Image: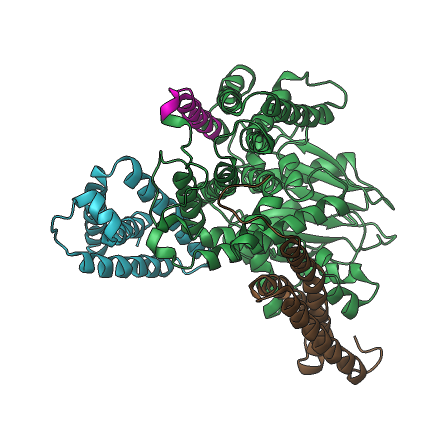
Amino acid sequence: MVRHGRPQLSVRYRLGVFSRILAAVIGGYAVTALFTACLAIGLPLVVLQPRAETVLAATLPAFLILCLAAIWVFAARSARRAWLGLLAAMLLLGGVYGWLSAVSLPGDA
Amino acid sequence: MSLLTWSALLYAALTALCLSLNRHYRDVFNNRPIWPSQRALRWLGFTGIAGSLLFCIASAPDGRSWVMWFCTFAVLSCTISMGLAYFPRFISLAGKTAVTVFLTAVTIEFSF
Amino acid sequence: MAWLHTWSGLVVGWLLLAIFMTGTASYYRSEITAWMHPEIRPSAPISEAASLKQAMDWLEQCAPDAASWLIDLPTTRLPVTQVMWQGAGERRYNSEWLDPASAQTLTPRKTFGGDFFYGFHFQLSLPSQIGRWIVGVASMAMLIAIVSGVIIHRRIFKDFFTFRPGKGQRSWLDAHNTLSVLALPFHAVITYTGLITLMFMYIPWGVDLVYGPDRAAFFRDIRDFSAPQVPALGRAVLASPETLIQQARQHWGQEHIARVSITAPGAVNARVELFRDTLDHVSSQPQRLVLDGVGGEWVGTNPSTGPVKAFYGVMYGLHLAHFADPLLRVLLFLSGLGGCAMIATGLQLWVVKRRGNSRRGVYRHIEGLNIAAMLGLPTAMAAFLWANRLLPGDMPARDIREIQAFFCTWLLTLLHAQMRLTQHAWREQAMLCALTCGGLPVLDILTGPNPINGLNLVCGLLGMSFAVVAWRLYQPAQQCIPQTRAPGSRPPRSERHS
């Protein structure tokens, strides 16, 4: 149904929106997971504190990260940019996580 | 600084801020000049809001006071908004009443 | 960004409305539970010492061999003493209610009370994994809707107080903006802290990486559960209630015990933990006194609280608002209602904007969903309370029947809204809502022990509000049908940014 006064939404536009939704949900969640993991492993190396503190400090910022990621995806100029940005973030955090896992001694909780 | 005092101040300050905006100033006063001026109202409004927050926290320095203040802010500003929509003639009177209540309460509190 | 705000709000809008409404009702969870148990008749003022003595005597008599006892002391909001005991080797607790004035067991009717709305709020009456995940996704969408809403409506102060009723779509937009902006701190904090309460389910990697498979150890650490204790073989007399009260008074002052936990009562290694009420600090972490169960001496202190754990406790506490005194609770309740109205006006704005002048088609059905969510749900909640009084007290499985009454009523309102023309559906459901809510105080006068209580007042006021809405909806058409622009015309400049 064509509505007067509104441009007919093209397939390309719809695909772009769908792509952004996927990026926000899957990519955002992945970035959040990696961020939390990095904090969970990295914080004990930096500051000596009870384990519960580390877990809380790693998990509390997660929702903010997810929110920021979702907002960023929809503020980016195109769906491709959104994906690229998220993939870059994932690679960076993944690298940090890998490095931190190697640095912290095995079995060190 | 009791609850009545800082909430009266907050209500007066919110009314002042509201009336300093052109749209509401037009609706309530029909563009006739008033005392204090619109600019003065804006300053009084912001000062009053900050003052009420300070008084609220000072009277009971506790996390709960913050919650109380923000909730009171929400409820009072909603009241003003509804008042503007349905009873615009009483906004100015209500604001003046709040100022009177605040000054009276402050005088009573500080003279004991 | 406007697209994000619209769709993140819309896709979960009806669900969020249900979550917000049951959450707002949960501010009065204890009061609803007390209302739904009319067998509770507090006669004399309740003293902490007397209640504790009665509870311990009762448990001594009726459950002397239990592995542990739990006693919840009566409060002004819920004036019953709740005693619970756990048999050796069992996980479940048995529980009984005692009347604090007469120390008799009460046999209240089986009902979930306010716990039903509370549980629905975060679990939607579904199996826990599914329900909590759905609520989590909806809450995350709400957080995104709030942030994107602030980004769209950057110039907050321009329209801060603006509400122009009677102008159709403009009015719905004004209402949505005003309700969102004026209580923005409340909405943002409630949504974020709500996510935090269940965050270990949604973001498990912190726990998994630090604690490995032993998640239970983590929850013991943050909730300060003491490790369970196996009763020793030697028997000893348990410390007297007076000793325990005296310790509490020494550390905390008068009348501050909320819960007493006694592990291995009657054994030599009995341990008593007193939990302080949390009425005067925001954090949800209660202070504990650990006492030796035989001599009553003070044994332990609270485990250390780091800054992050303290922050977490404050965040958790902000959501539950257990610290709210009656006035603050009213303000929070009103803010919660404002949140419901914010979501409702958003949903209705979307429909009004897009349906044009048509009375049929998909928007008519969507508006029907709006009606069922905004008016049908309060009616169903009131029906739950009606069922509590109308169903016989000794009916088997009556607690399930009450819940069925809730869901059946909601389903019927949904069908009604879909089958009737929307303008009729609005009027009729508003009227029904007014009658069911406003009828609750009347019902309580007829069937309850003490009709002068806060819940009746709130329901009466809500009923009157819905009645005013219904009256306005029944007014002649030209005052009430939202005006829409002719299709194809452009909105005036000031409206275009939304």
Chain drawn in brown: A
Q: Position of residue C192 (x, y in %)?
A: 57, 56
Tell me what hue chain B is rendered in: cyan
Q: Residue at x 47, y 45 (%)?
A: C332
Q: Position of residue C457 (x, y in %)?
A: 45, 28
Which of the pair C202/C355 is nearer the observer?
C355
Which of the pair C244/C120 is nearer the observer?
C120
Left or right: residue C296 compared with residue C370: right
What is the chief secondary structure element of the magenta stretch? helix
Answer with the quarter of the image where residue A99 lies. bottom right
Chain drawn in green: C
Left or right: residue A69 compared with residue C479: right
Q: Is residue C105 magenta?
A: no
The magenta segment: C458-478
A45 over C318 or under it: above or below: below
Q: Position of residue A8 (x, y in %)?
A: 58, 48
B80 over C158 or under it: above or below: above
How was the colour assigned to the protein in this rendering? by chain
A107 over C199 or under it: above or below: below
Q: Is residue C38 visible?
A: no
Q: Position of residue C304 (x, y in %)?
A: 64, 68
